[in-house]
Amino acid sequence: MGDLVAGQPALRIETAVSLPLDMVSVLSLLYRAVAGSDLDPWLVEARSRLPDPVRADLDLLHGFTGRLLYYPEEPVMRFEPLRPDRLDATFDDLRAFMAGIPAAEYCDMVEHALERVHADLEMRWRPPNDEESWARALAPALTTTPLADVLALIGDPAELKRRTIALYEGVWRAVYEEARAAELPMLREAARRGATFADRGFSEAYAALTGQRVPDVLERPPATITRVAFCPTAHLGGFVSYIAYEPDLIVYFSAPHLIARCSERDAAPLPPTASYRSSAGDEVDLLNAARALADPTRLRMLDLLLEGELYAQEIVGRLGVAQSAVSRHLAQLERAGLVTVEARGGSKYYAVNSAMFEAVASALQERSERARARIP
């Protein structure tokens, strides 16, 4: 028997459509969307439509916390957008939360953002307490904002708070409120499709959702990261974007690109070894069925459903598993055709699809017989 070592919780992987998190992505992209950039033309055009005071706040508040633009993330991450009761948060919810934060805490957010910059640069962090020490803390983080402008803002916490809220509100009202309403169905569709990859591990999910290899900086998330949320966004294109804010890692992926890749895959014919047509004419995707069955929690769910139809909350109670996890597992079983779902009285009722089980069993039996025929 080996030595005892401290265990670490398994990395939770999920997809989420979140307006507050999407706002962070849009703000950072708009900051970079100067004429001549390779970013989505919508971003360049939207930046040009921003009122001058909003554009000034955009450049000021992004230009003093390093190339990863940490400060604008701070109020949103304090909002805890991945909390179950905040996944459907509106912009007004976010604005009300930001308005309720005391002005002095906005200076704390600047300090935390600078501390993250120093950690990235492997520099010793010394908490600032006067103008001179603030200047030293800001020096390695400044990009496009003059030091004097940042010091003046930090010296007036009420103004720092006002301009931070004004930036979010200005971008929302001027360019993104209308765009978000039009994009929301696409974002939800991308999240739905992306959820099928949530049980495949971080690297495989990242490659499937972004269409890219995992960058070196994300190859091995630190032990302090316990949850990865993949968030669809409309304007990222082929770029990589993420927020590492312990204990969460937010990875953005292009919703249009994922939907296009899935559509191409759906249109492609199934390889002959991956499917089986039963005597009833039902097409069975053995690969999806095998993936759905290859999980102990999903097998326990199927054992419960073999006893009879259940609604989702009953499964949660009998398994003792989080509702979000139960929903994710049931969705995969439904996509594989192993269970059916019917909405009645405001609840979803799940049942085993016996025809699909028989078709899967027949497909495996056929292969067993072919293998047995080759045995001398």
Image: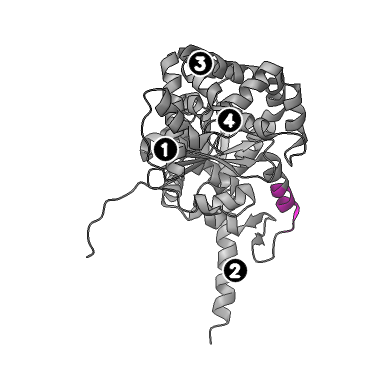
Q: Position of residue 131 (x, y in %)?
A: 42, 23
User: Is 328 left or right of 190, judged from the image as shown?
Assistant: left
The residue sitting at the front extreme is 132
The percent coordinates of residue 22 (x first, y second) are: 60, 30
Percent x, y of residue 214: 56, 53
Q: Find disc 4 in the rendering and name its residue.
A: 63
Comparing labels 1 and 3, the label whose residue is closer to the camera? 3
* Residue 148 vs residue 292, the one in the foreground: 148
Front-most of 96 and 58?
58
Q: Earlier in the sequence, mark 1 or mark 3?
A: 3
| Residue in the image at 30% along x and 50% along y | 7
* Pointer 4 or 3: first along the chain: 4
Residue with the mark numbered 3:
161
Q: Which residue is mark 2?
A: 366
Earlier-in-chain disc, 4 versus 2: 4
Inter-mark Cα distance, 4 to 2: 64 Å
Measure how far apart labels 1 and 3 are at the Cα level: 23 Å
Label number found at residue 246: 1
Q: Is residue 332 left or right of residue 122?
A: right
Q: Disc 4 and disc 1: Cα gap in Å?
A: 23 Å
Q: Amino acid at mark 2?
A: Glu
Query: Residue type at mark 4?
Result: Gly
Other residues around mark 4 within 10 Å, as few (<14) / some (14–19) / many (≥20): many
Q: Is residue 268 magenta?
A: yes
User: In the rendering, which numbered label is found on residue 331?
Assistant: none
Q: Is residue 197 above or below residue 58?
A: below
Residue at 53%, 27% in the rendered image: 147
How far apart are labels 4 and 3 at the CA level?
Answer: 16 Å
Asked if residue 338 is positioned above or below residue 190 in the image, the reply reads: below
